[in-house]
Amino acid sequence: MLVILKRDDEEISRQAARLITSAIRKKPALTLGLATGSTMVGVYKELVTLHKQGSLDFSRVVTFNLDEYLGLPAAHPQSFHHFMHENLFAHVNANPRNIHIPDGTVRGDYDQYCASYEASIRKAGRIDLQLLGIGRNGHIGFNEPTSSIGSRTRLKVLSKETLDDNAKFFAPGEESPRCAITMGIGTILEARKILLLASGAAKAAAVAKSIEGPITSAVSASALQLHPDVTFIIDDAAASQLTQRDYFSRKSCFCGFALNPEQAWGSDLP
């Protein structure tokens, strides 16, 4: 596991965009797992800028989003379809046929639909690079506490903490969705590379438990310790509860890979 410390959101976004760009340049048909949330807005803005400068081509990139709220149509302003369109897909040359986001309007056999999403990932040859955020309770995707480490794409009931966090995004009196379709922890762990971004003191406890704590279903992101190629990019506030913070800080200063990690990214992709 590599932990890269940055000063603020802007530096996190810039570093993450450089790593993603490096991977796409080395493998133009990259299978890229995408996430939503405020942390990702800056990353996608950086990627859009690079594309408009002519230095980043999305035409062969295949994308799979982590999750989507159940019950929200794609046009709903709080759907993840809408988020991705507004922040990335409307501004780059991604092929619509290569874009995969769980369907929040699906009805009936949820297990069958989720199995088909898994099958699409397998058909693409696994995810090469998975982008993640992290919730205050340590969730990745919508894998709430007590999620199985071996879980696959499925329908998940959201925790009260997540519902409370999400309420601010919906209009007064509008009930936020109580369920979501999400990739499982097992699905995420099958990605060849994982990149997790976090900023702010509100994420500090979850970050510390994920990096330094025991592997437990109570903190879904702690399962990332099992993966051989995970990079955390976090700011000082998110790193504030790490007991090994000084070590990670020194490594960010003195380790050549930490200074220029994009040089190695994508070199081992098939």
Image (spheres, rainbow, N blue to C red):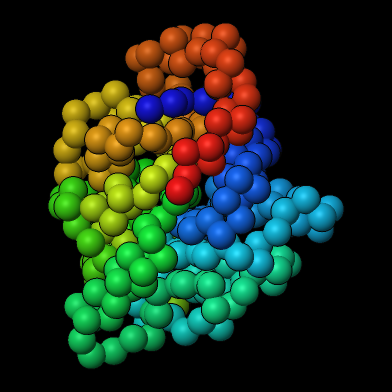
Between residues 116 and 11, which one lies in front from this camera angle?
116
Q: Classify residue 35 as left or right of residue 95.
A: left
**Is 209 drawn above or below residue 85 in the view shown?**
above
Q: Quadrant of residue 208?
A: top left
Residue 231 x/y as whole percent: 45, 33
**Is 234 drawn above or below residue 188 in the view shown?**
above
**Is 198 drawn above or below residue 78 in the view shown?**
above
**Is 161 drawn above or below residue 85 in the view shown?**
above
Q: Residue at x 57, y 9 (%)?
A: 254
Q: Residue at x 52, y 25 (%)?
A: 4
Q: Classify residue 202 as left or right of residue 210.
A: right
Between residues 247 and 203, which one lies in front from this camera angle?
247
**Where, quadrant-wise, is the N terminus in this rendering?**
top left
Q: Classify residue 137 as left or right of residue 261.
A: left
Residue 216 x/y as whole percent: 17, 38
Residue 23 x/y as whole percent: 58, 45
